[in-house]
Image (cartoon, helix red, strand yellow):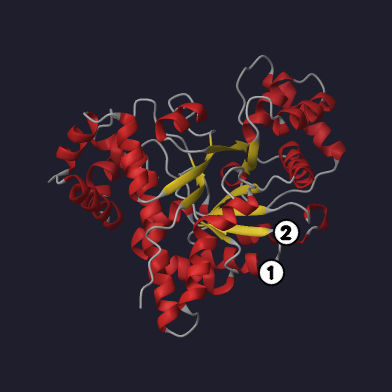
């Protein structure tokens, strides 16, 4: 029996850009790309003894014929950046990426630079919170916030977004308030008063924030832009208990958002909850991105669990790669490995035929993303 999805092109539906200075990473900087911890001791003494990191490094050393992490770090420093990125991403047939450019934006390449260096189509996913914060800071009145926010959220002037993203999981969790416009306006007045002359502002769970979030979901539905939602694991500012995607069930049931398509990102350890949501609601989708890298020894199991209840039309591949191109490469590698194993097991158990497994592979690795985000030039 021949069943091989190694050559399938993968469309990465959730990732971030790479560093402008991507060659210059020391041991800690490189390990940070494969850990959500900012604790120096974890990065110094524990990440390198984590199975996902050990297997990632081992694979890289075999590709380049090197012997140690130190040797690899010295080697990558001497490489031509464009060639290095393209070699790695070709190695796993990473064809195109949807990039959330709100992460590390001062140090990361912009989307044009990333497209040039990688030789790949790059699509924009726009973060809602950054637009909210700047709209609130610059507005004199609540009315002005509403109109500025909508205009900037949906703007195509520099680049047309293919998706929007919320990190509300990091800013108070996934159970959303449902404030009235009056309550949001009162909250705006209160926030403006407390800001005074301050030029920076971080939006946190509040009536104004959740009013704007809910407005965004309506706008996204009208503009046919899918909304990505951070759920499950992420960095330390996210309260993991509050990031359970099941907390969003009232939102998925709400008829006001029936036209809005939601994509649950990461999901771990709530993969079952997310997959079940996908099976219940036609407008809910999921990826496993960060989980597929950080829990890579379980990638086949996670994909198997997701496909146990989520229709295969609902699962999307993503790497959550950021900063160094090895992280995107590793995510894509694990998708292919994990998906192959999960589908093999399903064939061997008589659950699907080989042809059906290949169809599922194509849906998950590229077709679902192309259709959902309407990725031009890839269909
Ligand atoms: Zn991310």
Residue sticking out furthest to the right: 182
Mark nearer the N terminus (1 vs 2): 2
Specify whether 23 is left or right of 206.
left
The CA distance from mark 1 to mark 2 is 9 Å
The reply to whether the C-beta atoms of the residues labelled 1 and 2 are less than 8 Å apart is yes
The disc label shown at residue 10, or none: none
Residue lying at 29% horizontally and 45% vertically, measured from the top left: 42
> Disc 1 on helix, strand or loop?
helix
Q: Is residue 104 above or below residue 367?
A: above
Residue lying at 64% horizontally and 65% vertically, measured from the top left: 277
Dot 1 surroundings within 10 Å: few (below 14), some, or many (20 or more)? some
Q: Is residue 35 visible?
A: no
Q: Residue 78 in the image: x percent, y percent?
A: 21, 28
Determine the image quadrant of residue 273. Answer: bottom right
Q: Is residue 226 above or below residue 254?
A: above
The disc label shown at residue 252, or none: 2
The one of 158 and 261 positioned closer to us in this rendering: 158
């Amino acid at each position: 029996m021949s069943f091989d999805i190694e050559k399938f092109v993968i469309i990465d539906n959730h990732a971030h850009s790479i560093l402008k200075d991507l060659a210059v990473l020391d041991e800690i900087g490189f390990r940070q790309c494969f850990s959500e911890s900012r604790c120096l001791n974890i990065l110094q003494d524990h990440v390198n003894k984590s199975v996902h990191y050990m297997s990632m490094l081992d694979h890289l050393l075999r590709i380049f014929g090197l012997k140690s992490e130190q040797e690899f770090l010295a080697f990558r420093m001497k490489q031509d950046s464009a060639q290095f990125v393209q070699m790695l991403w070709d190695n796993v047939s990473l064809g195109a990426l949807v990039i959330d450019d709100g992460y590390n934006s001062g140090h990361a390449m912009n989307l044009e630079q990333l497209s040039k260096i990688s030789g790949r189509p790059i699509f924009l996913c726009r973060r809602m919170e950054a637009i909210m914060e700047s709209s609130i800071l610059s507005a004199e009145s609540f009315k002005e916030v509403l109109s500025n926010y909508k205009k900037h959220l949906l703007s195509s002037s520099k680049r047309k977004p293919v998706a929007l993203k919320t990190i509300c999981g990091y800013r108070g969790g996934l159970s959303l308030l449902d404030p009235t416009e009056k309550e949001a306006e009162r909250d705006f007045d209160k926030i403006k008063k407390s800001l005074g002359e301050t030029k920076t502002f971080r939006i946190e769970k509040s009536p104004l924030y959740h009013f704007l979030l809910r407005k965004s979901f309506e706008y996204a539905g009208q503009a046919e832009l899918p909304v990505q939602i951070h759920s499950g694991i992420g960095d330390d500012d996210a309260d993991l208990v509050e990031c359970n995607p099941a907390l969003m069930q009232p939102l998925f049931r709400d008829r006001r958002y029936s036209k809005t398509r939601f994509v649950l990102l990461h999901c771990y350890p709530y993969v079952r909850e997310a997959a079940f949501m996908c099976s219940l609601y036609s407008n809910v989708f999921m990826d496993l991105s960060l989980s597929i890298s950080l829990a890579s020894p379980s990638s086949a199991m996670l994909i198997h669990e997701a496909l146990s209840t989520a229709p295969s039309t609902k699962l999307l591949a993503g790497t959550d790669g950021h900063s160094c191109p090895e992280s995107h490469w590793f995510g894509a590698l694990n998708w292919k490995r994990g998906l192959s194993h999960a589908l093999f097991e399903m064939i061997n158990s008589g659950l699907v035929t080989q042809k059906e497994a290949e169809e599922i592979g194509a849906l998950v690795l590229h077709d679902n993303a192309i259709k959902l985000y309407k990725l031009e030039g890839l269909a």
